[in-house]
Image (spheres, rainbow, N blue to C red):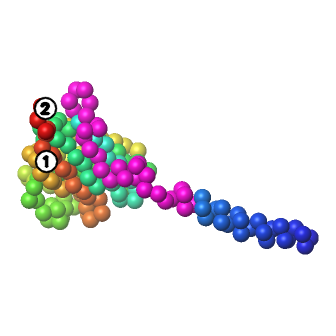
Amino acid sequence: MKNQLKRFALTLPTFMITLMVLLLLGCGGNTDHEANRNSVNSTTAKKPDGVVRLVINSDDLMQFDKEELKVKAGSTVALTLRHTGQLSKDVMGHNLIILKQGVDMATFAKKAAVATDTEYVPTGNETIAYTKVIGGGEATTITFEAPPVGTYDFLCSFTAQYTVMKGIFIVELARIPGRL
């Protein structure tokens, strides 16, 4: 019995150290995937038909998986919003709205919070593009022309989630072929 306890006493610390190392390896490290997680650049998403396809995911923890989306000026953009969670749109719905420059996000979100009949998009001329509200397991795609070069805010307007679900939509100058 003493020998078994001694072996257990020696293997328990080894087991704990091994477990800690595995957990650290599994959680740590700034991999290329993690570095690219917060940004989508249209140069890698452009298809032969000339349409830039962007995908952004949302979840039940009120998060977008990207804080930045980039396209070139003049692009036709197909933006897909996916809800990777399981909760229904009545409980944890998400949409994505790209605001025009100069629109105050908080003021817009206050109006959006009461715009239940229009899927949390208030009437007016403050948006560039927006998706419908979706729930867990759903996806929706919108197609629009990229606005002029600049930086634009995007957000989820469902029940004031904009405070945590937001980012920037960057439109960059398109490179002219033959010029640097």
**Residue at x 13%, y 32% (from the top left corner):** 177
* Residue matched to label 2: 177
Q: Is residue 144 left or right of residue 15?
A: left
What residue is disc 1 on? 128
Horizontal side of 60 relative to 120 (left or right) equals right
Q: Position of residue 7 (x, y in %)?
A: 83, 67
Q: Residues within 10 Å of mark 2 (few under 14, many from 20)?
A: few
What is the x, y in percent for residue 14? 71, 65
Q: Magenta residues, as a range?
A: 23-51
Any part of residue 103 in sight: yes
* Three-letter residue code for mark 1: Ile
Q: Which residue shows up at 40% across the image and 52% down it?
A: 34
Labels 2 and 1: the sequence-earlier one: 1
Mark 2 lies on a secondary structure that is loop
Would residue 159 be seen by someone viewing this image from the given angle?
no
- Mark 2–mark 1 CB contact (< 8 Å): no
Question: Residue 47 location, x and y as percent?
Answer: 26, 30
Image quadrant holding the N terminus, namely: bottom right
Identify the mark at residue 92; answer none if there is no mark: none
